[in-house]
Structure formats: structure tokens, C-alpha cells
């Protein structure tokens, strides 16, 4: 008896004609656009190098109490000092006065119970190693705080100015023009010097001064992008159906115009750390002995003609500052390439 023929499965015409790509969980969670950005950052050599440097400094900042324990019952951001001699001491010089607690890693690696100045001391016997380690924390929180606040102010003012236009746009942009005519570092230095008698010597006057004169570039940039976005069909449709202006600005317009501004912001984290260090070097803001790379560099001012001998005063905080800024610049360049393929390969 003949067996009945089984029907062959119907060919999957769609699968044969279109190369179907399997979507993973991460892409499904983030969405295709954000997944493309994340994948680009994790595969671009520049971003990998930048992320490595930023991660390294983040680890140092988090583990600062373990790497360089502070003196008991003292402000951890105050650099310990080994006496008051004006002459710097070279690396590996033994501590002689009030050495800080030994970290857990010291004896297994160094094989001794004597705490030494790993990177030497600056003028006034401030320990450079401690200043570099805890200065990483200062660089992180000041750079990110200043960038976040200036970005928020600039985006808010630029968005409102571009969306409403007319007289309000003219007033806000003329204010921006006035601020842009002022030299950034000079204006921040003057404002910080004015604030110090009222707020005292601390990080706060310098942070306020850098924020006050740092938001205008974001405002200009986001305004130009929003002017091109606000006339698109989906924005006009939202206006027709009566969607509130605030929702149109921050839900429909800003997410489609913010990426170029975010690229600049990622680059500015390092720039603001440099500006903060410059003001500290000039003696504005933080008190003497505060753990800040600019403060450490300021101790070398009296030894500029003898840096062949006292090279360590400048090299260690200088290398930390350069590598930190380099990490953010590499990440910002990679982010620019990912968001704008036309810029790929340009520096």
C-alpha cells in the first residue's frame, strides 16, 4: 500500500530574500540608536583608550583612602606634610614627622614598615604622592559638577531662546554675546577673587566662577540645532493638537538636538579641570595644602630654574593632569565620530 506523501514545508520567502539580523537583549533594551552609540564607543580604539584612562582614574579616586590613608581626625583632602623645610625632598625619602597610616599594600610590596615619600615632597614638605592620589577625587567631582551645571544652564537658556524666538531670543542672545566678550579665565579669576572674602577659601568660589562664565557655548550650540529641528513636521503636528510648549521642547525637540552639545560637554570635562588647576596654580580658590593638582604645581613656582634637580615637583602632578584630560578628549572625539560619521577620521 502506497504511503501518502507528506507536504513539504512552505519556503520562507521573507527569510530567503532578506538577511534577518538577530537582535540581542542589550539592543532590545537600549534601542537601535543607543545600541549603535554604545557599540561604537566600545569598538573605537580612541574611545577604548579614553575609557581605560577614565576608569583608571575613577578606580584611584574611589580607592584613595586605601591607596593613601589620611591622618586620623583630619580633613582627608588636606595633604600631610613632613615638616616645614622649603627645600623639596626627592622620591623615596623617609618620613620623619607624623607619617600617615601605612596602607594594607605597603609591606607586601615594599617589604618594610617605614613609610616613605614615594614621589618626593614639594616646597613646604607637602607629600606629592598623597596630593596626586586625592587630587584625583578633586578633579573628578569638580570637573563633572562644573560641566553638568553649565550644560544644564546652557541647554535651558538655548532651548527657550530658540523655541520662542522673537524678542526673548534677542534679549537672551545679547546677554550671551556680552558674556562671550569676556576672557574666560580672567573673568573667572576676578569673580573667584571677589567671592573668596565672602565664602572663604575653598573649592566653592572657583566652581561658581567657572560655572558663571562657562554656559554660553552650550547655549549657542543647542540654539542653532533647535532652530533646525523646531520646524519639522512632528513638532508642527504636536503644536496643532495642543501639546504644551514645555513637553514639545523637552520631549520632542531637545532629544533630537542635544547630541552635538553632549559631545562638546564630554570634551569640556577635561577643559574645566585644566581651568580649575590654573586658578589653583595662581593661588585662587583652595587653601594652601588642598589636594589638587594645580595646587601641587604651584609649589614648584620658586624652583622653576632648578627643575633639572627637582623635576618630581612638576612631573607627577603634571602627568596626572595630562593623562586625565587626554582620557576625556579621546572619549569626546570618539563620541563625535560615532554620532557624526562625516567627522570620522578628522581630528
Image (spheres, rainbow, N blue to C red):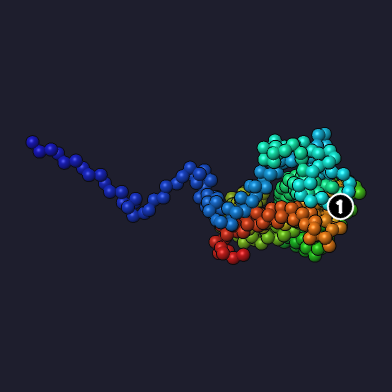
**Residue 56 visible here:** yes
What secondary structure is found at the residue carrying circle 1? loop
Instruction: Give coordinates of residue 82: x percent, y percent.
Output: 84, 43
Q: Is residue 59 left or right of residue 303?
A: left
- In the current view of this chain or complex, which residue is farthest to the right? 197
Q: Is residue 60 left or right of residue 75?
A: left
Instruction: Give coordinates of residue 29: x percent, y percent.
Output: 52, 43
Residue visible at 85% across and 40% down in the picture: 97
Q: Quadrant of residue 115?
A: top right
- In the current view of this chain or complex, which residue is farthest to the front? 111
Residue 128 to residue 106: above or below: below
> Toward the viewer: 214 or 7?
214
Q: Is residue 71 left or right of residue 334?
A: right
The residue at which mark 1 appears reads as 87
Residue visible at 60% across and 54% down in the picture: 49
**Quadrant location, the C terminus:** bottom right
Residue visible at 41% across and 50% down in the picture: 21
**Quadrant location, the N terminus:** top left
Instruction: Give coordinates of residue 241: x percent, y percent.
Output: 59, 50
> Dot 1: few (<14), some (14–19), or many (≥20) neighbours within 10 Å?
few
Q: Quadrant of residue 171?
A: bottom right
> Toward the viewer: 305 or 208?
305
Amino acid at each position: 500500500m502506497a504511503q501518502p506523501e507528506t507536504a513539504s514545508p512552505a519556503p520562507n520567502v521573507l527569510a530567503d530574500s532578506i538577511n534577518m539580523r538577530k537582535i540581542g537583549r542589550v539592543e532590545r533594551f537600549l534601542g537601535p540608536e543607543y545600541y549603535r552609540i554604545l557599540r561604537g564607543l566600545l569598538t573605537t580604539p580612541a574611545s577604548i583608550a579614553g575609557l581605560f584612562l577614565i576608569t583608571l582614574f575613577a578606580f584611584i579616586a574611589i580607592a584613595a583612602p586605601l591607596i593613601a590613608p589620611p591622618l586620623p581626625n583630619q580633613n582627608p583632602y588636606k595633604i600631610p606634610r613632613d615638616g616645614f623645610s622649603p627645600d623639596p625632598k626627592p622620591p623615596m625619602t623617609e618620613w620623619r614627622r607624623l607619617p600617615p597610616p601605612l596602607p594594607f599594600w605597603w609591606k607586601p610590596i615594599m617589604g618594610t614598615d617605614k613609610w616613605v615619600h614615594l614621589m618626593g615632597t614639594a616646597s613646604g614638605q607637602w607629600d606629592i604622592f598623597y596630593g596626586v592620589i586625592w587630587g584625583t577625587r578633586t578633579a573628578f567631582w569638580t570637573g563633572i559638577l562644573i560641566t553638568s551645571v553649565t550644560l544644564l544652564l546652557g541647554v535651558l537658556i538655548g532651548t527657550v531662546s530658540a523655541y520662542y524666538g522673537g524678542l526673548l531670543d534677542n534679549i537672551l542672545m545679547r546677554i550671551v554675546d556680552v558674556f562671550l566678550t569676556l576672557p574666560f579665565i580672567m573673568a573667572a579669576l576676578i569673580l573667584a577673587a571677589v567671592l573668596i572674602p565672602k565664602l572663604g577659601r575653598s573649592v566653592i568660589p572657583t566652581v561658581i566662577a567657572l560655572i558663571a562664565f562657562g554656559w554660553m557655548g552650550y547655549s549657542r550650540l543647542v540654539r542653532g540645532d533647535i532652530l533646525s529641528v523646531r520646524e519639522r513636521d512632528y513638532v508642527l503636528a504636536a503644536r496643532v493638537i495642543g501639546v504644551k510648549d514645555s513637553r514639545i521642547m523637552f520631549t520632542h525637540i531637545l532629544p533630537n538636538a542635544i547630541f552635538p552639545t553632549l559631545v562638546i560637554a564630554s570634551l569640556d570635562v577635561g577643559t574645566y579641570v585644566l581651568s580649575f588647576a590654573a586658578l589653583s596654580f595662581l593661588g585662587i580658590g583652595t587653601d594652601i595644602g588642598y589636594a589638587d593638582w594645580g595646587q601641587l604645581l604651584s609649589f614648584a613656582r620658586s624652583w622653576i630654574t632648578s627643575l633639572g634637580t627637582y623635576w618630581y615637583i612638576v612631573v607627577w602632578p603634571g602627568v596626572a593632569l595630562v593623562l586625565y584630560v587626554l582620557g576625556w578628549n579621546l572619549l569626546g572625539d570618539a563620541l563625535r565620530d560615532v554620532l557624526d560619521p562625516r567627522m570620522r577620521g578628522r581630528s
